[in-house]
Image: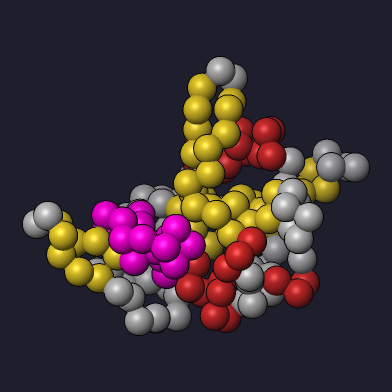
Amino acid sequence: MLSLNLPTFEAKIKKAGGKHVIFDVIRRRYVALTPEEWVRQNFIHFLLEHKGYPKALMANEVQLALNGTKKRCDTVLYKRDLTPQMIIEYKAPHIEITQAVFDQIYRYNLVLQVNYLIVSNGVCHYCCRMDYDRESYAFLPAIPCYAEL
């Protein structure tokens, strides 16, 4: 697969039904290995192994209702009280991170009201902390460790 701007990990990849699949440690099953899924699995392992995020508080493909339609957040991190704390949106490495990508995650946050938003295409990663009192946000210089949230 494509080289990313993330630490490498031992990916479990196999062929099933003539297509490549990768094991998702969060969903505990093999899923289709698309370029976006490659980014997701690499980013999740980065968060788990290098940033101390607890696997038990993460969920992939979280469905939510937005303006009468069903949408899916790529990954949601929850607080210990199970309220959402972070939304992570992934794009394939060849997809540029644009304002439209941030608009997408912003719309998801209208429903979830999290403290952190992350967007990554595996090459570029952006993280911002929401400030609801000032109705603003601030980009962080790096992805925070779980203990810093």
In the image, residue 149 lies in the stretch drawn in magenta: no
Residue 51 occupies which quadrant of the picture?
bottom right
Along the line of sight, the residue nearer the viewer: 124 or 48: 48
Residue 63 position, x and y percent, is 53, 37
In the image, residue 24 lies in the stretch drawn in magenta: yes
Q: How many marks?
A: 0
* Residue 42 visible in the current orientation: yes
Figure check: 141 above or below 32: below
As drawn, the residue found furthest toward the front would be 28
Along the line of sight, the residue nearer the viewer: 37 or 29: 29
Residue 135 left/right relative to 32 = right
Residue 47 left/right relative to 39 = right
Along the line of sight, the residue nearer the viewer: 132 or 65: 65
Residue at 49% over, 58% down: 120
Q: Quadrant of the C terminus?
A: bottom right
Residue 34 occupies which quadrant of the picture?
bottom left
Residue 68 occupies which quadrant of the picture?
top right
Residue at 27% over, 54% down: 32
Residue 137 position, x and y percent, is 76, 48
Residue 90 left/right relative to 138 = left
Figure check: 87 above or below 146: above
Q: Which residues are magenta?
A: 23-43
Residue 132 left/right relative to 126 = right
* Residue 123 visible in the current orientation: no
As drawn, the residue found furthest toward the left would be 18
Residue at 63% over, 70% down: 54
Residue 143 position, x and y percent, is 63, 68
Q: Quadrant of the N terminus?
A: bottom left
As drawn, the residue found furthest toward the top would be 68
Residue 44 position, x and y percent, is 50, 67
